[in-house]
Image: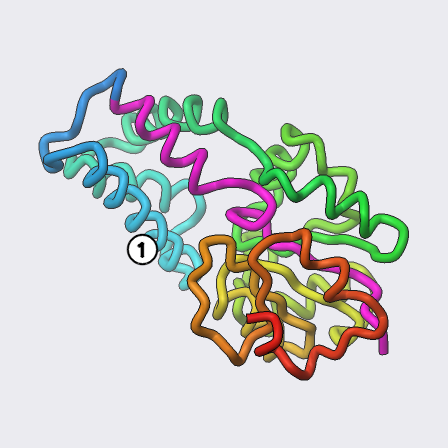
Amino acid sequence: MPIRAVLWDVDDTIFDYSGADRTGMRRLLEHEGLPAAYASADEALEAWRALASVHWARVAAGETDFAGHRRDRVRDFLSLALEDAEADDWFARHAAHYEAAWALFDDVVPVLDRLAGGYRHGILSNSTILHQHRKLTALGVRDRFESLVCAVELGVSKPDAAAFHAACEALALEPREVAYVGDEPDIDAAGAVAAGLTGIWLDRRGRGGRSDLVRITGLDELPALLAPDTRFGAPETFG
């Protein structure tokens, strides 16, 4: 059965989350100074990024909510026992710089234009609907996606098959009719494959090393990959 729709991850797939997060934090540190726990801005940036994964895992496990994970990330980053309001204020100052740096990757709009006539499009994200709707709207592409499914409202996160199946149901399609594109090899591509979708790993950083996955290094490769005569049974040819 041919692919009829593409489901997309958002952060570091169509939206340059890492770039915006680094820029936002650098600008905040320029204004507020380097926290005492860090010897350099680069060390602080690495810690800030690592803490994102640590605290998101707590959301996925049901140990905290979206606001709580942000507050705890700030507390750990600053090594301070902040009240909720203090942590919220600090995160809001970071968010102002971060949002000023929001940008799509350069290949996103061209590939959406190329695929517009042949495929439907939706979003499946390990975030919140409010956050991703606002982001995609600000970036000018929200209307390109007919569905938006997010883990916080769904109650289950990628790579759980239930998350992928819910996103397929939002499009009223079977998993075998849907491709999923994301930047994480296990959470996105392998998770999609296990759920019965066609999983495609967008390896923008050129990490490689996963011959078990269909892999592209830029979205300009996607239209040919989705063409009706493409055979997905030989992922190594894309690696």
> Total number of numbered labels?
1
Q: Provide the residue span drawn in magenta.
A: 1-29
Expressed as whole percent of the image width and height from the top left, the position of residue 194 reads: 59, 79
Q: Can residue 149 be seen at all in this image of the molecule?
A: no
Report the residue that reaches farthest toward the front: 237
Quarter of the picture containing the C terminus is bottom right
Question: Circle 1 sits in a helix, a strand or a loop, which is it?
Answer: helix
- Could you tell me which residue is drawn at 42 percent across and 62 percent down? 207
Mark 1: amino acid: Val
Q: Residues within 10 Å of mark 1 (few under 14, many from 20)?
A: few
Quarter holding residue 199? bottom right
Tell me if 37 is positioned left or right of 52 in this view.
left
Expressed as whole percent of the image width and height from the top left, the position of residue 92 reads: 39, 25
Expressed as whole percent of the image width and height from the top left, the position of residue 156 reads: 54, 64
Up/down of 63 relative to 2, above or below: above
Up/down of 207 relative to 28, above or below: below
Quarter holding residue 5? bottom right
Q: Nearer the viewer, residue 155 or 208?
A: 208
- Could you tell me which residue is drawn at 29 percent across and 31 percent down? 87
Q: Decide whether residue 218 is among the magenta residues.
A: no
Report the residue that reaches farthest toward the top: 31
- Could you tell me which residue is drawn at 76 percent across and 46 percent down? 112
Q: Decide whether residue 26 is among the magenta residues.
A: yes
Tell me if 142 is positioned left or right of 54 in this view.
right
Q: Nearer the viewer, residue 220 or 14?
A: 220
Quarter holding residue 83? top left
- Could you tell me which residue is drawn at 46 percent across and 59 percent down? 206
Q: Which residue is mark 1?
A: 54
